[in-house]
Image (cartoon, grey):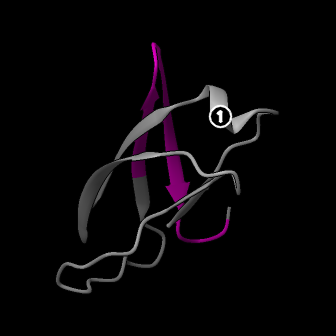
Amino acid sequence: MTLTYKGENPSEVGKVHYRFSASSGGGSAETELSERKELIHVSGSNGAVPQKEEIIHVTVEWKDKKEELQLSTNGK
């Protein structure tokens, strides 16, 4: 999973904590946002793949902000 920061200055963001969950599993991490403006999560767990038409719930937190997203595996 890759999350991309859409703002202008990633150095102002600082540490980012994110977590995600789906029926096939989930995960979380805390990291500094890179100059590339991306957070890349590589699963080291059981290798489960999300099911077709599954919704993945993602929460991203930084400083005093929080954003919740729903990602779809069906491309819609």
Q: Main secondary structure of the magenta part?
A: strand
* Left or right relative to 73: residue 46: left
Q: Is residue 47 visible?
A: yes
Quarter where residue 76 is shown: bottom right
Q: Label 1: which residue?
A: 11
- Given the current orientation, which residue lies at the most extreme bottom position? 47
Q: Amino acid at mark 1?
A: Ser
Q: Position of residue 20 (x, y in %)?
A: 34, 51
Residue in view at x 65 percent, y 34 percent: 11
Q: Position of residue 50 (x, y in %)?
A: 37, 76
Tally of numbered tags: 1
Specify whether residue 15 is painted magenta. no
Q: Position of residue 32 (x, y in %)?
A: 47, 44
Q: Is residue 23 visible?
A: no
Quarter where residue 27 is shown: bottom left
Q: Secondary structure at mark 1?
A: helix
Name the residue nearer the viewer: 49 or 53: 49
